[in-house]
Amino acid sequence: MNIESLFYILLAILGLGFLVFIHELGHYLVARRKGMRVEAFAIGFGKPIWTWERDGVKWHICMLPFGGYVKIAGMQKEGSREPYEIADGFYGKKPMDRIWVALAGPLVNIGFAFLVFTFLWFSGGRNKQFFDYTHRIGWVDPQSALYAKGVRPGDLIEKYDGKPFTGIKDLLVASIMKGETTRIEGSKVDYFTGKKTHFDYTLKTYPSPEYVGKEKLNTIGVLSPASYLIYQGPNLLAGSPMTGSGLQPNDRILWADGDVLFSHHQLSSLTNDSTAFLTVQRGDQIFQTKVPRVQLADLKMTLPEKGELDDWQHEAGLKGSLQDLFFIPYNISPMLQVESRIGFIDEADQKRAFETCERCAFFTPLEENDRILAIDGIQIQTPYELMSQLQTRKVLLIVDRDPNMRSTVLWNQADQQFDNFSASDLRTIVSSIGTDHPVVDAGHLHLLPPVTPKPLSEISKHVGDEKSGQRLVLGLPLTDRQVRYNPPPQTQFVEVLRDTYHTLTSLFSGAASPKYMAGPVGIVQIVHHSWMIGAKEALFWMALISLNLGILNLLPLPVLDGGHILFSVIEVFTRRPLRAKTMERLIIPFVVLLIGFFIFVTYHDITRLFSKFF
């Protein structure tokens, strides 16, 4: 941990301490105004390191530089006198006076939150990631029922769990709920034609594959929202396969091997698909398609077929066993024409290789007499050239060089601009790949030379295990596009109130587990992280925590400010003050529960913290 990180942690602790301080200051000022005797006001907790007295109040600055407390006379029994018998004490005053004192702390926190939301609005809002607010799906679990129903990356979510969808926060909330089903509504989008088809599914939830071995979070198959894939530059990772590709700073990786891209998940999946991108002639038509690239050991071949492939291996100068080489599951003539399919040893592999690919723009199975013109954009003349090219996995990429990509857009306009590329320009480039007249540039779009991905272990020393080390990567650091999030202050205020309400109702109903709540350690982590992003982000989280602190303290629990309000309201109706013994019996169990709750959430905070390192 460096000095900068320690500094931000200190800022986080001081920031949280400030929120508690202004809360107690509210109690202090109103208590003095109502004629209550304030005995002490402490800034911080623990042993006082500096003490002075003014106007009968002992002021302390304590060792722990956060939080604080106000001690008002008559909050508890003094000698034989009941609290209500102490004239200048808290319970010696009228119930309405006590209510105002109890309300003061939470109201200060709530007011501070609104002031911060107002400041953020006037100052232009915060820079956030497109990822946070998009309605587009970035990745769908291929094993999910949602995927089986044809929902794919790039499709739009309109409602989630019956509520209007606002972004990734809704996915996270749904993931920790204990609901057995979730309803998703939206539109399937064809990005080459612009056609949209409405869908509405209610699906069973299941443990998310993204969190295997970690906290149990549920999903229906939406694993991430969409994001831009922008190379900011100027330097690539050492040994990156993209070196020499002509990639430029601020290029957006838009298309790869037949698919418009919507997330890192999708790009990684495409990079690791063992496929080849072919240019094929069928009669008078030329088209592009992806075909499986498989090891010959997986194919069921006759001796003549093996003999022919053995000849091609020799002509291509390929070393090693024929069984270890890659090819496509088709018999190919010397003129590169398709003669027939080759069967697989495993029937499941055969089914996967030749099944219809739903909503795939470039996945047309080859037919008899189709002639292969090029592979991965490289024209070929002979079957052994085809075999030679198939031994190396290559990825075709198209980038968007729109200069507007550098600008920051409003969060509520970002979705409309995500697909602001020219579909006709994209079709022009793709339809020319592998032909005699390839088009490399069309509008803002540019086709890069074929890229050969490398195993992660070849370009990074930080590899978790052997399996992840063998995963193919492009060695390409990509970032999302920034959006300006700047709703009016009342909108932010209501959003936080709504989220707090949903959290509390979910906890009390048992729909969500309290282990997902952040305790003191978790809150410090959140504020620390927000300071590292920027001052505005830190201010937002301070306002959010302040508003939550104010609302939670208004809950009618004896240990909170709302409990003191409740006692005062009871006294108004009964016209009898509560005795110290009665208050103790009500307060002590809740104190024990509160301490237990803090220990519980702190344990889970620490568990989550250490799980990042182990």
Image (cartoon, grey):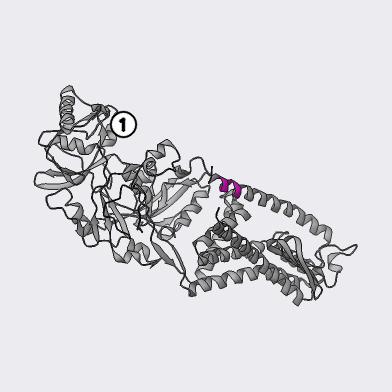
Residue at position x 25%, y 39% in the image: 392
Magenta span of residues: 605-610
In the figure, is residue 593 to the left or right of 431?
Answer: right
Q: Position of residue 532 (x, y in %)?
A: 51, 60
| Residue 165 shows in this picture | no
Whether residue 43 appears in magenta in the rendering, the answer is: no
Q: Residue type at mark 1?
A: Ala
Main SS, magenta residues: helix
Name the residue at 52% across, 49% down.
176
In the depicted structure, whether residue 132 falls above or below residue 124: above
Tally the marks: 1
Residue 308, placed above or below residue 492: above
In this rendering, would 529 be left or right of 558?
left
Q: Specify the quadrant of the image occupied by residue 424.
A: bottom left
106 or 196, which lies in front?
A: 106
Query: What residue is pinned by disc 1?
Result: 348
Residue 264's spot in the image, x, y percent? 37, 50
Label 1 crowd bin: few (<14), some (14–19), many (20+), radius 10 Å? few
- Residues 400 and 24: in front is 400
**Coordinates of residue 399 in the picture (x, y in percent):** 27, 56
**Rendered image quadrant of residue 65:** bottom right
Q: In the image, is 305 to the left or to the right of 93?
A: left
Which quadrant of the figure contains the C terminus? top right
Is 212 above or below relative to 441? above
